[in-house]
Amino acid sequence: MTLIQGTDPRTGEPVGEAYAATTPDELEALLAAAAAAAPSYAASEPCVRAGLLRALADRLDENAVALAELGSLESGLPLGRLTGEVGRTSGQLRLFATVVEEGSYLEATLDPAVPTATPPRPDLRRVLVSLGPVLVFGASNFPLAFSVLGGDTASALACGSPVLAKVHDSHPGLSATVLDLAATVVAEQGLPAGVIGAVRGNDAALTALRDPRIKAAGFTGSTHVGRMLFDAASSRPDPIPFFGELGSINPTIVTPSAVAARGAAIVDGYVDSFTLGTGQFCTKPGLLFLPRGHGLADALAARVGAAAPAPLLNARIRTALDDGVAALSAAATRLAGGEDAPAEGSWASPSVFVTSAATVAADPAVAEEVFGPVSVVVEYDDLDDLAVALRSVEGSLTATLHVEDDDSLPLDELVGLVAARAGRVLFNGWPTGVAVSWAQTHGGPWPSTTSAQHTSVGATAIRRWLRPVTFQDAPDAVLPASLRDANPWGLPRRLDGVLVLP
Amino acid sequence: MTLIQGTDPRTGEPVGEAYAATTPDELEALLAAAAAAAPSYAASEPCVRAGLLRALADRLDENAVALAELGSLESGLPLGRLTGEVGRTSGQLRLFATVVEEGSYLEATLDPAVPTATPPRPDLRRVLVSLGPVLVFGASNFPLAFSVLGGDTASALACGSPVLAKVHDSHPGLSATVLDLAATVVAEQGLPAGVIGAVRGNDAALTALRDPRIKAAGFTGSTHVGRMLFDAASSRPDPIPFFGELGSINPTIVTPSAVAARGAAIVDGYVDSFTLGTGQFCTKPGLLFLPRGHGLADALAARVGAAAPAPLLNARIRTALDDGVAALSAAATRLAGGEDAPAEGSWASPSVFVTSAATVAADPAVAEEVFGPVSVVVEYDDLDDLAVALRSVEGSLTATLHVEDDDSLPLDELVGLVAARAGRVLFNGWPTGVAVSWAQTHGGPWPSTTSAQHTSVGATAIRRWLRPVTFQDAPDAVLPASLRDANPWGLPRRLDGVLVLP
């Protein structure tokens, strides 16, 4: 029997009990429950789903201290960060309650019949409906915000899709606690138990991914595992959408003007950003493009050298970091860092390497993500040199420009270069903050995601779990409430091509 | 050298000249031109793209007679049908011009900065942008509306995506004419030639599908070919979205109440619908569920027996039809039809088979699409019997209910059953008409499409070629016009979560 055991990355010691992987019989019951719950949950009133999301948020907040303490033990992340993450997670659930109530996400569209057209046009009414049960793979690096009740789950529950969450092996105790809490809330709200369930273990998750009752999947993790799961979803007899957020190098470009205006502040912001959460943010700036002759090497070395070691999430990530650093050491020059870290647990010290834009263009492997507190400074000669290197860098969740209003480099050209290869373009900031809001995009071209067409953070993440259905000449009484003449839910709707607010 | 030669399906005789398949050098030039055109075309003003779409529509209409004549020769479809199809195609281009001008499709969303939030929220502005060049596979059955300037192309051009169209082997002459016309219009509009191009031959198309410069693909055709291309798109080192419309059985359910009220009219409508265009509509009703004891067999046999043979689009479809009819003959009972058709060309006579709901449930292969003028009557005993059979039927573009207001069967349950497995649900009509409008869905669960999340007909087809980009704390001057404070394009936008009309 496979056992899943949490470990304190600070000590390497086990935390709490060991959890058995989901058995085939248990998985069958979970899938059957999700499929059974799907039609009624998909058809539920917006207030039912908004009520569930708010109740889940409240329950998380009520248990914030206990959840943060348990999460910190299993992840090695600081208590303050995890307390903040509880708030991020509950805030995310509440945002989707608002999205459900506002109702634009349904894209309700009514085209009246035109009997005089050639051919006569029937009455057509379109709305988005749930695809069905969704499988969500929890991430290691955000044990709450991208896990059992994270953004994928919140957005799926919002639109009426039951969720089966794959618990990450790194935080089984926290996940079990969150699942218990969620199951209690689902029962209190009078909803079927199949609305949310969880599976443990890779075999059960892969079986679920291939099961015809699962209609879509969300994932946050490595490019290697994400690609394997994407291939499994795509090669089903009935392929399903797989929304994976994989590896992202998040290039950050600093112009000569920005170096001159605020080089020291840029060094501070960069080191803070790439070492935040022990460098385990999906949006960590992995490449810092600096103009040759930037004069910031000493300041960088001092800041990185002074940064304390910190625990990585688990031993596997530590091993992968060692491999990545070894590869970088062969391809680039270490500028600073890499001091010895404590031997127990999975500690790591930050490192910065330096290379040239020409090297990146010739060997893009230098510009691939190494998960953990490592980043690469890329020195460029001029705009052409920078552009050639950027064009060889893979797609990213973010790209950042540090520029001045009267910059010596042409901003339009820089924006065009980076907007073509990222889902979010930042100015004079750092990418490791990802606000949960209506306009956020946490997505981008391959390999940062498996589908650049969507986001996993922000209000529009809900679109991933929906498909359109059009009703033609339907009697009003059998239409979904969203499409009835009387508009009982007070939705924004498009009537005969014109958007009309309630 | 591979040659592509049009053939008159009525005679089997060649039509016009033979066209050489695209060579690797030609393909490289086409891909380079599309990629070079992409940034400026994506950034063009809405009036530029709307102007192009309307100019293309006008040019089609001006040449309607010549195009219909050439199309009829190569496809065997009647002249009147093809004249109508020119109008459908130009109407489609004009609808997308309206969509571009209206601007909701951009989903422009502005979240103002909240410096007092924890953590402080930056200014975030989201808009949808073109994915890049799109490869469009033309269909055999709509030589205009789903071909070089069909719906996939119109929707891609609308949002700023250059198009490379794979010409269908069945109508190379018509496609060459339409491409010439389009290229002339593109030049007249002062746009780069790479905005629209065409490739001939399967090898060139598959090479293009795997090329990193192609960012998405659209396809209408068989499940077999569509699956092969979907797999190629999904297995690229950088997978791309592949929007394929494949096989669809389009179940049509007639209740006992509907039979009693208007059985004879239903027989007429059904035979007209499944034989329309020689049964070569994607939305052909392939299954007609009738209550046992319907008493319509004689009327059906008489109508089908009286239907004249008609040419299929090409000899390959004729061979596949023969295979499909042979398989159906072994699994079901022929009710009527199948008379001898002319030996020259690729003529076929309509056929209707009959089977039971229990047979469909036990052997869903009986319920798989056979392309051409063939349909299967499925007799059911009661609602349970009907429901079990429907649950074994694959996903479809459409599902149709023939019901009465005071029906003896529960309408809510019937609607739930069919809405779960189709993209469009019709009441008391026939699915072979597909209006081009804002609310249309021409899509559905596998295998009717490779992505149930989208439509290939109607205004929202444009969403397939777009991805979001969010700008964080960007200076107003470098933002796309859609996101600038002044809203120069007069777009509907979401401001701080609230949808605001211009």
Image: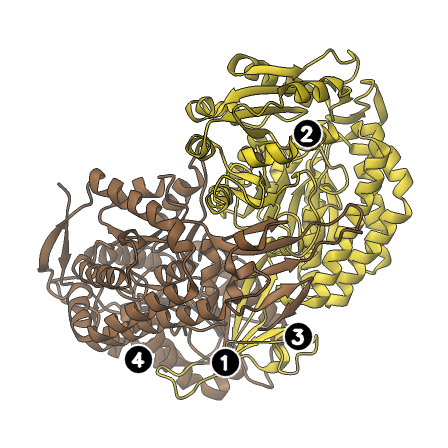
Chain colours: A brown, B yellow
* Residue A159 place in picture, x, y as percent: 43, 59
Quarter holding residue B434: top right
User: Mark 2 = which residue?
Assistant: B264
Badge 2 vs badge 1, beta-carbon distance below 8 Å: no
> Is residue A245 something that shows in the picture?
no
Label 2 to label 1: alpha-carbon separation: 64 Å
* Circle 4 or circle 3, nearest the eye: 3
Label 3 to label 2: alpha-carbon separation: 58 Å
* Residue B90 place in picture, x, y as percent: 80, 50
- Say what amino acid the circle numbered 4 marks: Arg
Q: Quadrant of the N terminus of chain B?
A: top right
User: Mark 1 = which residue?
Assistant: B123
Q: Chain of mark 2?
A: B
User: Mark 3 = which residue?
Assistant: B481
Q: Nearer the viewer, residue A441 or A119?
A: A119
* Circle 4 or circle 1, nearest the eye: 1
Mark 3 or mark 2: name the one nearer the start of the chain: 2
